[in-house]
Image (cartoon, helix red, strand yellow):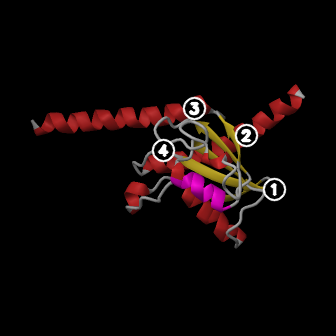
Amino acid sequence: MEKEEASLQGIHERWMRQALEEADKAEQLNEVPIGAIIVKDQQIIGRGYNVRETQHQATGHAEIQAIEDANRHQQAWRLEGATMYVTLEPCPMCAGALINSRIQTVVYGASDLKAGCAGTLMNLLQDDRFNHQVEVISGVLAEECGDKLSYFFRKLRQRKGKNIDRAE
């Protein structure tokens, strides 16, 4: 059993690294580095990264982008049997989209203390009052995912601090 769990953990880490690559794309655009992929039958069917600032869209979250990409790929709105890997715990909007798209499983890296709705603030994904529940696996490459976000915000604060100094 331990060998099986270790193997499954390795698979989750492999896919999470793909989500981290999507997060890198967001960071290159000076977006908050959050990335997501959707996997079905051991193939990536959707990819997304945060584009809220560059596209001026409140819904420009990595999860939404990945769901829309997977919908186009599958030519269907239902993503039954698919797993999303996302670097940050889904917010309420994204949790709703995951439920509505019928994603089977969400695997996330870092917990979101301010907006996490996969177990941190609440667990919308597994609320039995909805017509669909999503399996949740948390903490996969959590430190790496969290460090990426921390580094981004630290750099952002430093840049803002330098801009403030110049204005004086």
| Mark pair 3, 2: CA separation | 14 Å
Pointers 2 and 1 in contact (CB under 8 A)? no
Query: Does dot 3 land on a helix, a strand or a loop?
Result: helix
Query: Does dot 2 land on a helix, a strand or a loop?
Result: helix
Q: On the image, numbered disc 3 is attached to which residue?
A: 144
Q: On the image, numbered disc 4 is attached to which residue?
A: 33
Q: Residue at x 81, y 56 (%)?
A: 41
User: What amino acid type should be assigned to the residue bearing mark 2?
Assistant: His
* Residues shaded magenta: 93-101
Prevailing secondary structure of the magenta residues? helix
Pointers 1 and 4 in contact (CB under 8 A)? no
Q: On the image, numbered disc 2 is attached to which residue?
A: 12
Expressed as whole percent of the image width and height from the top left, the position of residue 166 reads 14, 37
Q: Residue furthest bottom?
A: 75
Does 20 appear above or below 94?
above
Q: Residue at x 64, y 33 (%)?
A: 139
| Mark pair 3, 1: CA separation | 26 Å
**Circle on res. 41:** 1
Q: Residue at x 68, y 46 (%)?
A: 126
Does residue 168 appear left or right of residue 44 in this picture? left
Ranked by sequence position, the earlier of labels 3 and 4 is: 4
